[in-house]
Amino acid sequence: MKTFHIRFYENRKIYFGISIGIMLVGLIFNIIFGTQLDVQFKGGAMIKYSYTGDVEPNKIEQAVESAIKRDVSVATNMNVKSADSDKTQNNVTLTFAGNEALSVDDQKTLLSTLQSLYPKANFKLNSSNSVDPTMGTSFFQKCIVAVIITFLLLDIYVAFRFRKIGGSAAGFFGIVALLHDVVMVYFTFIIAGIPLNDNFIAVVLTILGYSLNDTIVIYDRIRENRRLMGLKAGYAALVNTSINQTLTRSIYTAACTFVSITTVYVVGLVYNLPSVTSFALPMMVGIVTGCYSSICIAGPLYVMWENHKAKKLAAANASKGGEKAVEKPAGKAEELPAQKPQTSTSSKSAAPKAKTTGGQKKKSKSKKKKH
């Protein structure tokens, strides 16, 4: 495989700018159009009918609202292939938001309204689902808890597996890359106008596993190169080398997965299957962002953190060295005055003793002369 020589850490500001720019666009869309929750999360009822010919959604909406006095949103799907045969059919879906379920009488009224509005359409009931708002909110909260628990378990796993290269930091920045991917998937739902439903949770959990696998491959190569390049190699050179060595593998893996999901998306479009396309389209975006964040986000952030730690440690050592340099002259200054008086006092005390001994000898000599 070809080995690249891209300076990922040195170009980190470009990568961070691209991600921040895309997030700002998604945030603007979110502010303008808001977040749509599907019936599965906010509660309500959904009824699907099959029909033939052509119908007008606006006309059906007005007729249904006047018939049962409730707000409704109408969506039509044309030429949907049946699972039981090769024939295609048209479907119309009526969605009622709120905490009131549709009674049997309401459903009979709906069918009679549609048949009277379009007598030749041959409306037939396909499915009817009702979700209590309390259960929808509880389901949404449980999904969020599942995502949070997944984040924590992944962080613990990465921290334990890569403890020799700063496991907690490696795990934390791996999680930052995963959060980047989740935000991108969320904004894909917002920009494409897809209501948040169980497909969103399925895409998020799938992307978490896929993106983390790509990040772990790079971390694993960093751990091997740390042993081969030694401790003297800088973190920027270490991470750049590791990412370049695994870059071809990451691109090939992401490309193969992307082609597979694109095929699923095309099939969903051909057979007009919204449940399939609303899963495949965010998955396509998640695969691209998962590969991008593992290469361009997690690695440079890890280098920035390690460089910050090294500078902080160097500053702490420099401050300790400065304190020692200040202490040495203070110790000498204390010792020097203490030594001078000792030498002076000893010389002074020694001089009288010499004089006294000398005097005694002279006295003894004079006594001998007198005798």
Image (spheres, rainbow, N blue to C red):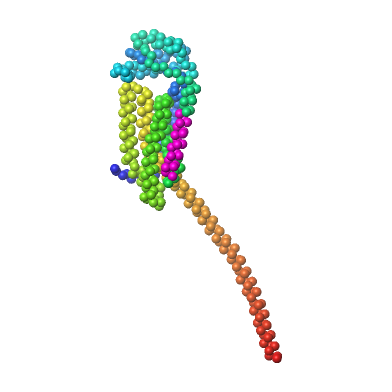
Please tell me in which quadrant of the rendered image residue 151 appears: top left
Which residue is drawn at the image coordinates 42% and 42% (left, top)?
161
Please tell me in which quadrant of the rendered image residue 191 appears: top left
Q: Position of residue 1 (x, y in %)?
A: 29, 43
Res. 52 visible in picture: yes
Give the number of callouts. 0
Res. 193 visible in picture: no
Which residue is drawn at the image coordinates 33% and 33% (left, top)?
257
**97 up-or-down from 315: above or below:** above
Q: Is residue 162 magenta?
A: yes
**357 up-or-down from 254: above or below:** below
Q: Position of residue 136 (x, y in %)?
A: 47, 23
- In front of the other: 318 or 368: 368
Q: Is residue 335 magenta?
A: no
Q: What stretch of residues is rendered in magenta?
A: 143-163
**289 up-or-down from 317: above or below:** above
- In front of the other: 292 or 174: 174
Q: Quadrant of the C terminus?
A: bottom right
Q: Position of residue 231 (x, y in %)?
A: 41, 51
Which residue is drawn at the image coordinates 37% and 18% (left, top)?
76
Q: Position of residue 352 (x, y in %)?
A: 66, 77
Q: Main secondary structure of the magenta part?
A: helix
Please tell me in which quadrant of the rendered image residue 183 appears: top left
